[in-house]
């Protein structure tokens, strides 16, 4: 049987404070390659990534060493010359992953807001054929989400938007707005993600496109971790995101 190639992608922007913790928690034995795309950070994200690779016993930036040593995990670092935005960063991540032969692509934010140790479960559900997409849901209970640091307005906006999106699509996903996701190669090849927004609404557009294609989507619980160093959009951008999400929902309903 052909070996399933798993690639973890990390869309990074000003992640110098949390990058090392994030990478150190990735279960390397469950992945084949790690791709970090830096979106023209203003800090030392790229320099720190390279230093982590040099010190890590399994990571290598040498393709030859990776091909000749099955214990190694290839670490590819790509840097945008100009900032392209959250969606634009993901586009580069997915293009690189597909070019490198990924069968399963797992997205982890390098800000340590999502637990990298859960990667193996995301991979197993797709590898074993249960789902084509796995989402990491932070919403198990209001108490847990709030105690994990999620602001009240983000929690209630998340609940309201997810309810509307589920109603429009007939889905029953516990959260539509998570940043930890895994996709099969087939899914990424079947949706025109390059045509989507370069902003945060990119994630919403991707899910609506996947629903239209009829792929099976699963979700598994992940801990809620909001803290000072973790990236989070402010109130004004959150409002813009919410409005654009509603508009994408309306467009989905019209298209149906």
Image (cartoon, rainbow, N blue to C red):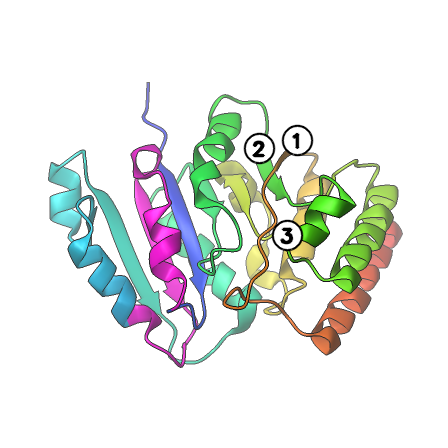
**Which residue has dot 2 on it?**
132
Q: Who's the residue at 47% across and 56% down the image?
A: 112
- Please state, as top left, top right, bottom left or bottom right, where the N terminus lies in the image: top left
**Which residue has dot 3 on it?**
148
Q: Mark 1 or mark 3, which is nearer the start of the sequence?
A: 3
Name the front one of labels 3 and 1: 3
User: Would you say 68 lies left or right of 189 here?
Assistant: left
Q: Is residue 232 above or below residue 173?
A: below
- Residue interval drawn in magenta: 17-46
Q: Who's the residue at 48% across and 37% down the image?
A: 118
Q: Mark 1 or mark 2, which is nearer the start of the sequence?
A: 2
Estimate the x, y position of residue 98 in percent, counting from the top left: 40, 47
Q: Who's the residue at 76% across and 73% down the image?
A: 240
**Which residue has dot 1 on it?**
216
| Mark 3–mark 1 distance (CA, rounded to whole Å) | 29 Å
User: Would you say 119 lies left or right of 144 here?
Assistant: left
Assign a secondary structure to mark 1: loop
**Dot 1 crowding, Cα within 10 Å, few <14, some 14–19, many 20+:** some
């Amino acid at each position: 049987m052909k070996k399933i190639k798993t690639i973890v992608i990390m869309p990074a922007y000003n992640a110098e404070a949390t990058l090392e913790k994030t990478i150190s928690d990735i279960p390397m034995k469950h992945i084949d390659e790690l791709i970090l795309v830096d979106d023209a950070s203003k800090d030392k994200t790229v320099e720190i990534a390279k230093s982590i690779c040099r010190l890590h016993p399994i990571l290598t930036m040498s393709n030859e060493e990776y091909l000749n040593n099955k214990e190694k995990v290839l670490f590819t670092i790509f840097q945008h010359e100009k900032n392209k935005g959250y969606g634009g960063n993901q586009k580069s991540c997915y293009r690189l992953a597909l070019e490198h032969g990924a069968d399963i692509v797992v997205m982890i934010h390098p800000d340590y807001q999502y637990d990298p140790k859960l990667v193996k479960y995301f991979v197993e559900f797709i590898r074993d054929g249960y789902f084509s997409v796995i989402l990491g849901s932070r919403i198990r209970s209001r108490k847990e989400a709030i105690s994990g640091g999620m602001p009240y307005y983000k929690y209630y906006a998340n609940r309201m938007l997810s309810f509307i999106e589920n109603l429009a699509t007939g889905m029953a996903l516990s959260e539509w707005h998570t940043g930890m996701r895994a996709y099969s190669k087939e899914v990424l090849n079947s949706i025109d993600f390059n045509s989507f927004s370069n902003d945060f609404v990119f994630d919403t557009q991707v899910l609506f496109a996947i629903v239209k294609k009829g792929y099976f989507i699963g979700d598994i619980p992940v801990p809620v971790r909001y803290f000072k160093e973790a990236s989070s959009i402010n109130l004004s951008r959150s409002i813009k995101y919410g409005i654009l999400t509603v508009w994408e929902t309306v467009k989905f309903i019209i298209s149906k």
